[in-house]
Amino acid sequence: MRIVISLGGNAFLLRGDRPDAEVQRANVVRVATAIAPLAHDHDIVITHGNGPQLGLLAGEGATGPDTAGPSPLDLLGAQTQGMIGSLLVRALRDALPGRRVAALLTHTLVREDDPAFTRPTTPVGPAYPRKVAQHLARTHGWHLAQDPGGGWRRMVPSPVPEDVLETDTVQALLDSGTLVVCSGGGGIPVTTDAGVLHGVEAVVDKDLAAALLAEDLKADFLLILTDVPNVYAHFGTRDQRPVHDATPAELRNGHRPGGPMRAKAEAAARFVDHTGGLAAIGALDAAYDIVHGRSGTLVRPDFALG
């Protein structure tokens, strides 16, 4: 079976962790330990988040009189892909002796006229005091919004992924028996003009990009791993309950997961709708059990006739 795995950014930096290299090295061993049993029996592609890492880099150079200013988001995305990819490859090679493992830098094509560019909604980087935020908005042309946790954060567009440009290369690596790490942070966002690629100030939702990649690779299973065991219907209310099994329509219309889970649920639903395959959402440490139907939320086609 061919499985595309989408790892959350918190797989490498847990909530409350210090954002340093040693912590990430320790956490990535846990990731490799969870995924290795699946790699013994299946073709595996691993995609991953980069939110905490991108946020740290995006905050560097933004303030202070002696800085050169913030780097473009597309280049920061490339930087985090390389860093996290290297950590994953080393841990996976240790966990899977003799197995070919490779990290591939990937670009994700988005439409220049995507409505998201006029409505930046994704927070990136640290929260700033009001006066600092106002200065950054004037200096860099940033859009900032008040963060529920306090302070003001930079908001950037999150356009819909149209194509993962290195899909054919991922396919070739899979055909050679290689476990592939790619599409970090949803891929480096680019647009095209007369065949020339241009990086854009945006971030692509990693789970939607993983669903698109899984569809194009003709994967059998999309596995979205996070830090909770299930999707929860009516999350945050007195009626909250775990969802163990759902069709795409049930997931979208009946259970209505909220918060960050909404995009994960939509990615799983899209993959199942478009391919007739299976998707699941659940906790990292239960990856093997999720694929074997013993944990998580399974998203399956609606087999009803008529």
Image (cartoon, rainbow, N blue to C red):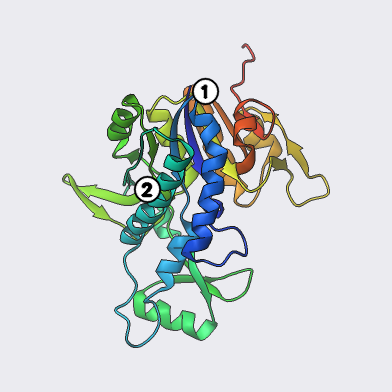
The residue located at (56%, 42%) in the rendering is 264
Residue placed under numbered mark 1 in the picture: 277
Q: Could you classify mark 2 by the number of other residues whose Cα lies within 10 Å: few (under 14), some (14-19), or many (20 or more)? A: many
Asked where in the image residue 104 lies, by quadrant, the reply is top left
Q: Left of 207 or right of it: where is 60?
A: left
Mark 2 is on which residue type?
Gly
Residue 88 x/y as whole percent:
44, 47
Mark 1 is on which residue type?
Gly
The disc at residue 169 is none
Q: Could you classify mark 1 by the number of other residues whose Cα lies within 10 Å: few (under 14), some (14-19), or many (20 or more)? A: some
Position of the C terminus, as image quadrant, is top right
The residue located at (73%, 41%) in the rendering is 233
Report helix, strand or loop for mark 1. loop
The alpha-carbon separation of the residues under discs 2 and 1 comes to 23 Å
The residue located at (55%, 53%) in the rendering is 27
- Foreground: 111 or 163? 163
The disc at residue 187 is 2
Q: Is residue 255 visible?
A: yes
Residue 173 x/y as whole percent:
31, 31
Residue 143, compared with residue 161, is above or below; it is below
The residue located at (48%, 21%) in the rendering is 1
Q: Is residue 123 visible?
A: no
Q: Left of 17 or right of it: where is 187?
A: left
Residue 229 x/y as whole percent:
69, 42
Residue 152 x/y as whole percent:
54, 74
